[in-house]
Image (tube, rainbow, N blue to C red):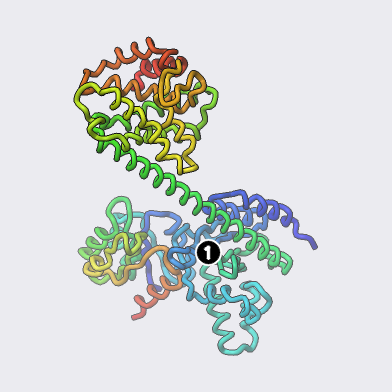
Amino acid sequence: MKTLLIVDDEADVREFAANFFRKRKFKVITANSGKEALQEISQNRPDLVLLDIKMGDIDGIEALRRIRQLDNKIKVIMVTGKKPEEEDASEHCRKLGALEYIHKPLQLDELERIVLNQLIE
Amino acid sequence: MAINYKKELEKAAKGMILVHRPDVLIKMIVRTIVQKARVRHAGILLHDQDKDTYILTVSRGPTGLKIPAGFCRVDKDNPLIRYLSNPSRYNQLGPFLLVRDNLKRLLRRRLLPETKKLAKDILYQMEIFGAQVCIPSFFRQELLGVLFLGDKNNKRPFKQEELDFFFALASDAAMALQNARLFQGLQLQLERNERLFLSTTKALAGAIEAKDHYTRGHTERVTQLSFILGEKLLQKKFSGMTTDFLSELRIAGLLHDIGKIGVPESILNKNGELSDEERRIIQEHPIIGARIIEPIAELSFVAKGVKYHHERYDGRGYPEGLQGDGIPLIAAIIAVADCFDAMTSDRPYRQALTRQQAIEEMLAKKGSQFHPQLVDVFVELYQEGRF
């Protein structure tokens, strides 16, 4: 069973996304901040991280940078609430090793497809 | 068998037409359905005109799936949206509305491959949203939104009668929603127009300041003084004062000297005392100003303020020598503000009075030059430190 880490500072989002992927036979762990995410990663080594960009303490991009220092192989998908015309950090995130960069509101079927694609060996 | 919650929902739907904020309305619809129809959760995928996609606007329920608002969307090429957008295809998957249990039953039968694929795709979409039923709502043949309902709390299937009823309700809600959107659009348009009008007026008022060197800042100050005097009169429930009056007063303040555009610059900026002829010409500015504004029917009230702001309470002013309450209130207010600002400003032929001196001067001319009650209120504002 693959392990998924969902990082978002909104409890509703964590709860919904966790249930969504649990139903799809993933082991899901969650973190409400960048700091918590780093702890979870060093303890549980998830296969994939869904990382929200806008968060209180350290933002998603900084978290991504620190994840890379911790573990070079872990797969990361960035999620942003910003519209592409407002802010587009996709290039920056790709350089830091994020595999995908997706926008809220997101299509759930697409999200599932992206996650599954990344986890097929 | 009658549906026990039908009446309550119908009543709620009728009330919706009175709600003018789309976001409030949508929350209301979903909450009402969840409570009255006793379902685990309900949500609305609503068409977003800007992005041309369907956004999950609200989803709530006491026990069911809770999807955060604005978290997901469904694009137009999604099988669910494609199917519901096109009612002529509805018979493909059985009677009318989409019900998850019916689709499952359908899939156990022998089906054409494309029907099977369609049913599977849609079933998958419904499962994502935890939807037992999906109900389309249309406005002028356009799919405006999709209302979805989770399972009933008691797990029983929805009756056909209930589904028909929800469909009717969704149509009413779509109508109310469209109404609310139009209203909001109109409201925004109105606000934009008002802002545009005010800035146009300010630009026009600026034209006179460019020409008359001694009145720089005068227009702005007179507008401000008139406005606070008007506000105070409104507070005191002075006869004839209303909030509409106040906004017209602001415009009249901005435009009160607009007629000076028709007065030669040599006279306006003259260093020294004016001849009788020059004085006669300058005294035409209220009439010229009124004439400039008069073609705008909506500003007829403002035009009065412009035309009569040099009338005196005792009838010795110009241009018509109106007297006492014969002078429109809007003009009498501007007269007070205008004279005060003139007295406290430097002129080529005399130095400015202090504000205290100007106030004393106004008290001395109360009832002769100025409307006595207006002077009293103006002095009160001065003593309160309002200017």
Picture quadrant where residue A104 is located: bottom left
Amino acid on which the number 1 mark rests in the picture: Leu
Position of residue B275 in the picture relative to residue B240 (left or right): left
Res. B177 in view? yes
Q: Find residue B110 and report its horizontal and vertical position in percent.
A: 64, 89
Chain under numbered label 1: B
**Quarter of the image where the N terminus of chain A is located:** bottom left
Q: Find residue B80 and report its horizontal and vertical position in percent.
A: 54, 74
**Quarter of the image where the C terminus of chain A is located:** bottom left
Q: Residue sitting at 56 percent across and 54 percent down?
A: B180
A77 to B342, vertically: above or below: below
Q: Nearer the viewer, residue B132 or B147?
A: B147
Residue lying at the far right of the rendered structure? B1
Q: Residues within 10 Å of mark 1 (few under 14, many from 20)?
A: many
The number of discs equals: 1
B133 to B265, vertically: above or below: below
Q: Residue sitting at 80 percent across and 63 percent down?
A: B1
Q: Residue sitting at 31 percent across and 66 percent down?
A: A45
Q: Nearer the viewer, residue A44 or B311?
A: B311
Position of residue A92 in the picture relative to residue B166 (left or right): left
Q: Nearer the viewer, residue A34 or B203?
A: B203
Q: Find residue B179 and report its horizontal and vertical position in percent.
A: 58, 56
Res. B228 in view? no
Q: Find residue B55 and report its horizontal and vertical position in percent.
A: 48, 63
Position of residue A90 in the picture relative to residue B101 (left or right): left
Residue picked out by circle 1: B45
